[in-house]
């Protein structure tokens, strides 16, 4: 369904390379998680897929195709047909994506008219039904409420309803549950998993939290300093990481451990775009770095796992 | 352990709406107390009330024996200038003045207290930045020029510069990725262990909170649902809402003892009764009366009619 080949994204007037050699696929009904620290390129990648890169950032190479349509060459009118109809998105902070002066129902009805071609008389019932399908109780009442009257979890459900109103094949969720408390976060993640199952919706989930990705994603791509360092089936990657950065992420992630303990950190900071070293970009923070890590490293694929580490085969890394 | 902060029957009202309803809680000297609960449960209001930033309607907040709610005028200003209590705000980008340098921001509290010469302030600012693991050279930068993790540490440095006895941290790590989150939480644990600072920290991240905190208080709808030693409370919750939070916490390990769905309920609930009854799958007629907080297992307390014998949640 979604195929990204060798994507390169540059930022700023000098065209500093911020994302490179990113290749990934999401099949129908599948969920792929993109994880990494802030600035790792995961959000730029998903914004490139949506055609909404921030000012100054641009796709400088590679191809993004959605069901055969090349997204990298689309003009504005082409995007209007794709966005909302074939790919939709939800983000962190749902309140800022809704108009505060219009009711939730009116904003959802507008989508239904635009994307499903419903007539005015038909939209209300369809909107209420869709809100109910998002697990909103008292959907009739919520239809008539303004964004400020709803909790963060309810707003995120309403936004998901708006996103899926046009029946897209792919939903991009960028840190969509980050600001929610655990009980509500779990409900929204269950809703996303449910939409996959019932509608065959494919999911591209971006999160800095490996634990969130582990809850909903079949496969995971680990981003570091603008590159994918490891990609494969989530359960497998977690049980048996092959890149030292993935192992480090696992050590700092939530394990459902309630004991008092020393919390792990990853020492140092990732390099900034424009200051990437020629060799492995993680080497400066890596406990296993050797001399040859200063040489450029290409990703290698064994079975369904891709790893960008020259020592991948020889390291005994610890999973969770 | 002695009590540093004693909150008794605290109620806070906004627009005739009770946001905190009779909360009693003691914070012990030199401990880290975690506060968890959903958005709107009163966590932030509780911290703000202690800092004198929320309209207290009833109850008492005593800091080392001094009733803060009774302070007025000059006495109140004098108490504030001691800097004994510092509040670390939630959103570092909004809590830091973008026009000021990090040095000015961190030194502001010292300048307001008016006890020190500029050279001394500069030294204390460097010390504070070093304590939170930042390069003192950052003092010349502005908030927009540093990373989110660094901004959060600047907020902490600002609070530490005046050598507080109690730190109130409102979601200090929710905007950070896992490594930076653990880094900041380790700083808090270090302050407790080496300087004896008492810390109250609000967080959604149960697993990392459990790594550093001594005790935890669970708030639901403005009331205290449960409190006790954090390892015991999270490993064996006594209140159905705590059990739901624990079962919902994301983990890289997928398997769970209790699926969250089994702990979600829907019902009409009881007006004037237990405020969790509308969501509680275990609610009975007994829940028409609001449960009082009662002591269990010596060091724990829970407000639930069914907490003791009837319910078993293991997670």
Image (cartoon, grey):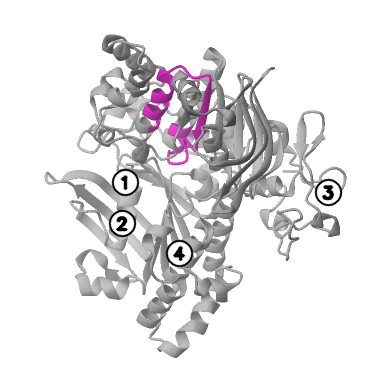
Query: Which residue is disc 1 drawn over?
Result: A41
Distance from disc 3 to disc 2, alpha carbons, whole Å, reads 49 Å
Q: Nearer the viewer, residue B215 or A87?
A: B215
Which-is-in-front pick, marks 3 and 2? 3
Give the magenta-colored segment's residue range.
B152-181
The chain carrying label 4 is A
Do the residues under discs 3 and 2 have CB atoms within 8 angstroms?
no
Within 10 Å of disc 3 (Cα), the crowding (few <14, some 14-19, many 20+) is: some
- Residue drawn at (31%, 28%) of the image: A293
* Count of picture labels: 4
Discs 2 and 1 share one subunit: yes
What's the chain of the residue with tag 2?
Answer: A
Where residue A301 sits in the image (x, y, percent)?
A: 39, 47
Residue bearing the label numbered 3: B306
SS at mark 4? helix
In the rendered structure, which disc, 2 or 1, sits on the residue that comes first in sequence?
1
The residue located at (28%, 24%) in the rendering is B104
Of residues A80 and B69, the one drawn nearer to the viewer in this rendering: B69
- Which residue carries the number 2 mark? A47
Q: CA distance from mark 2 to mark 1?
A: 10 Å
Q: Secondary structure at mark 1?
A: loop
Discs 3/1, front:
3
């Amino acid at each position: 369904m979604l195929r990204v080949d060798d994507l390169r994204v540059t930022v700023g007037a000098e065209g500093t390379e911020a994302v490179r050699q990113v290749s990934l696929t999401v099949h129908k009904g599948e969920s792929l998680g993109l994880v990494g620290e802030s600035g790792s390129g995961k959000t730029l990648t998903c914004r490139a897929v949506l055609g909404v890169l921030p000012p100054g950032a641009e796709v400088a190479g590679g191809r993004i195709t959605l069901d055969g349509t090349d997204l990298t060459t689309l003009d504005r009118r082409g995007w209007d047909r794709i966005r909302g109809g074939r790919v939709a998105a939800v983000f962190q902070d749902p309140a800022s994506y809704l108009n505060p002066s219009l009711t939730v129902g009116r904003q959802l009805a507008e989508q239904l008219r635009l994307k499903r071609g419903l007539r005015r008389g038909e939209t209300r019932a369809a909107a209420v039904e869709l809100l109910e399908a998002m697990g909103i109780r008292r959907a009739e009442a919520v239809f008539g409420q303004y964004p400020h009257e709803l909790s963060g979890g309810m707003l995120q459900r309403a936004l998901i309803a708006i996103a899926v109103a046009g029946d897209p094949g792919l939903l991009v969720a960028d840190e969509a549950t980050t600001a929610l408390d655990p009980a509500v976060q779990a409900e929204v993640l269950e809703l996303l998993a449910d939409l996959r199952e019932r509608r065959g919706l494919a999911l591209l989930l971006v999160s800095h939290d490996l634990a969130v990705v582990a809850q909903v994603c079949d496969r995971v791509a680990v981003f570091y300093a603008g590159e994918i360092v490891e990609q494969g089936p989530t359960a497998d990657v977690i049980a048996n990481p092959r890149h030292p950065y993935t192992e480090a992420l696992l050590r700092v992630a939530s394990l459902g451990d309630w004991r008092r303990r020393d919390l792990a950190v990853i020492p140092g900071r990732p390099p900034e775009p424009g200051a990437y070293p020629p060799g492995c970009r993680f080497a400066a923070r890596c406990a296993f770095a050797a001399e040859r890590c200063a040489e450029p490293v290409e990703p290698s694929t064994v079975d369904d796992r891709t790893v960008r580490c020259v020592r991948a085969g020889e390291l005994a890394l610890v999973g969770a | 352990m002695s009590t540093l902060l004693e909150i008794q029957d605290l109620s806070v009202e906004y627009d005739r709406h009770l946001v905190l309803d009779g909360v009693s809680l003691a914070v012990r000297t030199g401990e880290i107390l975690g506060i968890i609960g959903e958005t709107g449960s009163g966590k932030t209001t509780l911290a703000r009330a202690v800092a004198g930033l929320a309209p207290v309607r009833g109850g008492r907040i005593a800091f080392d024996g001094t009733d803060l709610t009774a302070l007025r005028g000059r006495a109140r200003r004098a108490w504030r200038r001691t800097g004994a209590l510092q509040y670390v705000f939630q959103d570092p980008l909004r809590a830091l003045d973008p026009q000021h340098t990090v040095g000015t921001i961190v030194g502001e509290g010292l300048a307001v207290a008016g006890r020190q010469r500029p050279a001394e302030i500069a030294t204390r600012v460097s010390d504070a930045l070093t304590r939170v693991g930042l390069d003192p050279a950052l003092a010349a930068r502005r908030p927009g020029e540093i990373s989110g993790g660094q901004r959060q540490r600047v907020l902490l440095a600002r609070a530490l510069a005046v050598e507080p006895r109690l730190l109130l941290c409102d979601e200090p790590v929710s905007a950070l990725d896992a490594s930076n989150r653990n880094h900041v939480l380790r700083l808090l644990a270090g302050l407790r262990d080496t300087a004896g600072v008492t810390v109250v920290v609000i967080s959604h991240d149960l697993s990392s909170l459990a790594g550093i905190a001594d005790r935890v208080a669970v708030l639901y709808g403005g009331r205290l649902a449960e409190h006790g030693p954090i390892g015991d409370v999270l490993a064996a919750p006594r209140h159905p809402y705590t059990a739901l939070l624990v079962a919902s916490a994301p983990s890289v390990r997928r398997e769970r003892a209790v699926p969250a769905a089994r702990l979600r309920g829907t019902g009409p609930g009881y007006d004037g009764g237990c405020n969790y009854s509308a969501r509680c799958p275990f609610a009975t007629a007994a829940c028409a009366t609001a449960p009082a907080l009662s002591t269990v297992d010596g060091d724990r307390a829970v407000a639930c009619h069914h907490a003791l014998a009837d319910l078993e949640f293991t997670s």
